[in-house]
Amino acid sequence: MLIRQKDAPIIDQSKGKLRWIVLDEAHSYTGSTAAEMSLLLRRVMIAFDVNPNKVHFIATSATIGEHKEAKDNLKKFLASLAGVDTQQIHIVSAKRNVPDIPSVNNQPLNQVKSLENLAQIGAEELVSPERFQALVNHPFAQKIRQQFVRSSDNGVVTRIQSLKELNEFLKYDINTLLINSDKKISNIDYLLNWLDVCSNTKHKDNAPAFLPLRSHFFQRTLSGLYACVNPNCSGKHNTPISGIKNNGQPIWEFGYVYTNQQTSCSHCQYPVFELSYCDDCQTPHLLVQKGMVTVGDSHKTKWIQFNRLKDDDFTLNRSSTLDEDEQIDERAENEDNANDFQPMLLLPIWSSKHNLVKEVSDNELSYLYPSTLDLDGVEYTTKSDNRVEIIVKNETAQLPPLNYCYFCDNSSPKKPVIRTARLGAPFYMSAAAPILLEHCPIFEKNTDSKPAQGRRMITFTDSRQGTARITMKLRQDSERRSLRHIVYYNLAQRFDSSQGLNIKELAELNSLKFQYEALQNDSSASPMFKDLLEDKITDYENKSKIQPPALKWEEVIQSIADHPEFKFLSKSISKVADINHIYDDFQKAELLLLNEIAYRPKNANSLETMGLISFNYPQLDKVNIDKFTEWTNLGFSSDDWKDFLNLILTYYIREGNPPKLKTPNK
């Protein structure tokens, strides 16, 4: 506003009227940032023609501290920042309002109520005066509370406790209580159950819980998976990744897997490289970077871990092709990666010999070539006992190494199809948010027209761009869950619960089968009786076949348009609908449904991939292959042809990529 000419009228009309200036996160103003802010504030007061003594400065921070020295330093800091006297600075601190409760006489822990008995008092009720009083009278509950809540000269205060430290402090009491418990449970789980009961018990609505607890959980993000290059690594022996499949393929073709980066294997000392996987076939690859080393009189290639940023003094803050931490959707990726620094790939040896999608032509031999690596990652062309075989995918291939998979023919000229394993903050936030929202109060008004029935919570992140992206993803996920609920619920309503066999009929069916099998070897048995048994068994088996409910496409669309949540859902596609001149609710509902199920994602959740619905194409039932001799000559049946067409429709036509059929030369 100070430098934009169009804002000058605002400042002119506001001269002498500035009364309040708020500085958030005051603790962050240090060094040059504080000097710049101080000069900026003085320019603001000159521009608005006000005296600093007439302006109220408010500085907020959650990390100021409670000690007198910290408060004195804060006063001096704010006075110099605002250009006023320290006498004008007043610090207002907030304290948590936690009431004190009377102490109790220590009773022997083997004579008090068990946790199970306490939890049954007013079970499932947050407000329970009786359970609250029982906790007040319980010595162990009091002892837990005293670790978090203490009385001091300034009133009742709270302090932080780690679960590990709390368990260590209370372990003798916990062991005593567990002696009298029928449940086999660990000390940590038992302590967590106590914390649940204590923090979910109030004596009245507006009062704090017996234990005013707030938990802080720390989740480590996954910045990659790493694997030893040695397929015979001793670290994977007797683990789920050891062993051989029926076709001779190793269950896992590399060595031990690590969740943290390290350069060499702790078990066999061979090099460790970052894992990546093909989007389609999920075949693992190892990311490497080419280096050179002198061995004797010759120069050798040495494979080292891929460095995400190319060493370039003139490239600053360059984003890496492999940084998928904030990937929002598998179809919404950065497609402009042609100039990014690409790694080279090491391919698993068994799959490279048996599972290539096509034979490698002569002009592709330089792209894939066999090699051996020693303990230092140095490449050799000859085999040896202290070297492992590997297939190298060279950087000279027509497509960048990450853009083509030789195992399934998956390719893209613009975006990587081979990706690293990354679970960043957006992934964990999007997974945790729905669970956290379930425990938030429902909004009082118009709950059906809002996502999550109007439940609200506040989240924080250090990334502005990440905040915007995850907010959009959370909203999209909420919309998709609402739509999935509507479709699945309407199908479930059509389910005939009378289908299937009850317990009595199932027992009778088993008895009939037993009798029928016994009569098969009895030559004196009446054929008529056998036929009667067979008919009864057939009737029961037909009844046991449960027919899933089915809805026509139009019926599903109408159920969405008639649902109370449609008002909320329709807002998400309003712009797309307006562009396409769609104003009818039925057409908007169809647009929503198409957005969810027209495309079947390969690596994401949808109604179809989660197994909640399936598509039925009625026209396929009318297909007749009597004259399709080419198909029947191959030994395939009519059902095989229908299944084949179903696959084509599901995985190609609906995806918008119809298969290209080559006409044989005649």
Image: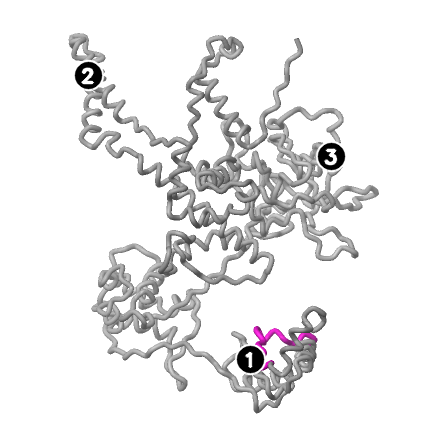
* Left or right of 310, for residue 460: left
Q: State the residue in front, 488 or 412.
A: 488
Label 1 or label 3, whichever lies nearer to me, is 1
Q: Please, what is the three-letter code of the amino acid marked with disc 3?
A: Ala
Q: Secondary structure at mark 2?
A: helix
Label 1 close to label 3 by CB (< 8 Å): no
Number of residues whose C-alpha sits closer than 10 Å to that of mark 3, classed few (under 14), some (14–19) or many (20 or more): some
- Residue annotated with mark 1: 58
Furthest residue toward right: 297
Tell me which label, 1 or 3, sits earlier in the chain.
1
The magenta-colored residue range is: 18-33
Q: State the residue in front, 606 or 222.
A: 606
Q: Is residue 354 magenta?
A: no
Residue plotted at (49% across, 10% down): 632
How many labels, in total? 3
Determine whether 463 is above or below 374 in the image: below
